[in-house]
Image (cartoon, rainbow, N blue to C red):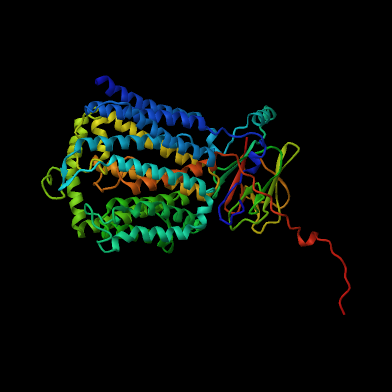
Amino acid sequence: MQLTRAGFLVLLWLFVLAALRVVRSDLYAASGLRVSVPGFRRNAEKAAKGNKAPRQLVVTHGALTGTRISLDGRPILIGRADDSTLVLDDDFASTRHARISLRGTDWYVEDLGSTNGTYLDRAKVTAPLRVPLGSPIRIGKTVIELRS
Amino acid sequence: MGSPVPTGEAPLSAATSTSPGLRPPTRRGTELVMLGFASALVTAALILVEANQEQALTMQIVYYGLAYMALFAVAHLAVRKWAPYADAVILPCVALLNGLGLVMIHRIDLAFEGKVIQGELYSAKAPKQVLWTAVALVLFCLVLKFVKDHRTLAKYGYTAGLVGLVALILPGILPSFIAPEINGAKIWLTFGAFSIQPGEFAKILLMVFFAAFLVSKRDLFTAAGRRFLGLDLPRARDLGPLVAAWAVGVSIMVLQKDLGSSLLFFGIVLVLLYVATERAAWVVIGLVLFSAGAIVAWKLFNHVQQRVANWVDPLATYNDAGGGYQIAQSLFGLGTGGIFGAGLGAGRPDLIPEANTDFITSAIGEELGFVGLSAMLLIYAVFALRGLRSSIAVRDSFGKLLGGGLSFALCFQVFIVVGGVTKLIPMTGITAPFLSYGGSSLLANYVLVALLLRISDAARGPKVTPKPKPQQPAIADQFTVMVERPK
């Protein structure tokens, strides 16, 4: 009698623990924002060893705050157009607002003739500018930066 | 999806297009194992109840367990087919809660069997609830089948809002032959033999509306107003929707005498606003408004005063009609259960009024004790955790808001009912999701689960790369052909 009473409670807690185990094993797979792709990540890490090359682009302000995009060498298009890499839902951004692209080992930001301009730190981007790690790029209400 | 829904969606094609062949694990196997575990637990609970109530232990019980498992196997297959990447923990949690609810309702049936309650012979509730569970699971499968993409719901935002509002208000304004006052609350619509609680469905419809509305009008709510005491206050004219929600909440409280629903409704609106804008000011303003409304209602209405008096001291009003009897009995039950409980089937839940609906958590607390009840609450917490996790991971704003709102609504409902029966807040008469006896609540909550699974499927599944739009070459790039000017 006492045994079954305790036994049932133990089973109930085992269920809770089993559920939490699934949650734990699933923590990274479910995040969606950072899909771990083993092969790709390893290559990127190898390339980045030694020098502090930017490896991801992070949105720090605006509606998309927290969004990360892995940098894989291809240019990043930013704007309201559906086919942009980072699609902004922002009245102050142009359809094709700015591009961040790799030249040699450095990333450069250039403005694509936007209405309200692109700013790197405080400076308005008129010609392609080199983007140092961690300096904010402001586009409309959105601020992004490169991180290693 | 080329849907015209204004959602800030899919900004991440660069990160993901690097892995075309790689698919995230579906984890359906895990779900099946967990469902088996849940069914085994439910069967064990049923065996314990039968043994402690000195019923004959026959193979019948095992068949019940297998039938229960078969019901959820169907749901599992539906998930496998229509939402293969959905979260693996949500459905087993629901299966366990619902199953333990069924066992508890059956256990209370046994206690009342053959007795005459309020001039009528007590009729067993468990078979009806099993039927409702089956119907709810059918509805669950249908929602999964027909809502292929949660973003399509955003298109029906205003329709959902209107229908939801009507459903919410309807029982309060209809004459009492169709909307009778049961236990002091006017929240049911009766059609002959069965009655429904439209408010349960309104909850979900209004959430769809608010999520769609906030996604399209989010900028409006973040527009800066005056800064006061470190809070960014919104502009006065942007307060309109919040005031409207507040008015609806208060009118439910007044017209239908249903404090629980009004609290739930207003809480959902506030949380959605907060999630959409990240402004604490909205929560502060909302709480101030709600407190003011609650205090005025307390001054004006008798039934609110009574609830508060019962909460402050249930024993003082123990013998009054509609007094603290219910809460006091619930507390006695919980006290009798203690840390480890009396054991399933060995308590006296028949002494707690409404033990199969509003007070089912205190019946469970009596028989499973603090240890068992806290495990149940943790299962709710895991459910909400997975829901919130999915809404963080999903890539469109509407899904984020809806997912967050649905998870929060379930959590908040549990808080209101458990807070009520444990005398943390005034008792408000609301069902415990999945546990309590009641068809409407069960149906609505299964719709909620189906929508959450749909959102988690979208969050975890492989990204659907939108079909590239046929590129219209710019007019400047077009070939120009010189033609002769027509004369």
Q: Residue furthest top?
A: A3
Q: Is residue B159 in view? A: yes
Taking the image as shown, residue B338 lies to the left or right of residue B41, namely: left
Q: Quadrant of the C terminus of chain B?
A: bottom right
Q: Residue furthest bottom?
A: B487
Q: Residue at x 38, y 52 (%)?
A: B201
User: Residue B390 in the image: x percent, y percent?
Assistant: 49, 40
Q: Report the number of discs.
A: 0
Q: Is residue B479 left or right of residue B357?
A: right
On screen, residue B343 versus residue A18, left or right, reads: left
Judging depth in this view, the residue of A69 and B483 nearest the camera is B483
**Figure check: B165 above or below B352:** below
In the image as oriented, which residue stretches furthest toward the front?
Answer: B59
B12 in relation to B188, above or below: above
Q: Position of residue B455 (x, y in %)?
A: 50, 44
| One can see residue A16 in this view | no
Give the image location of residue B150, x and y in percent.
51, 49
Viewer-proximal residue, B197 or B468?
B197
Q: Nearer the viewer, residue B292 or A27?
A: A27
Give residue B438's position: percent from left, percent from top.
31, 46
Q: Quadrant of residue B125?
A: top left
The image quadrant of residue B163 is bottom left
Q: Is residue A144 left or right of residue A21?
A: right
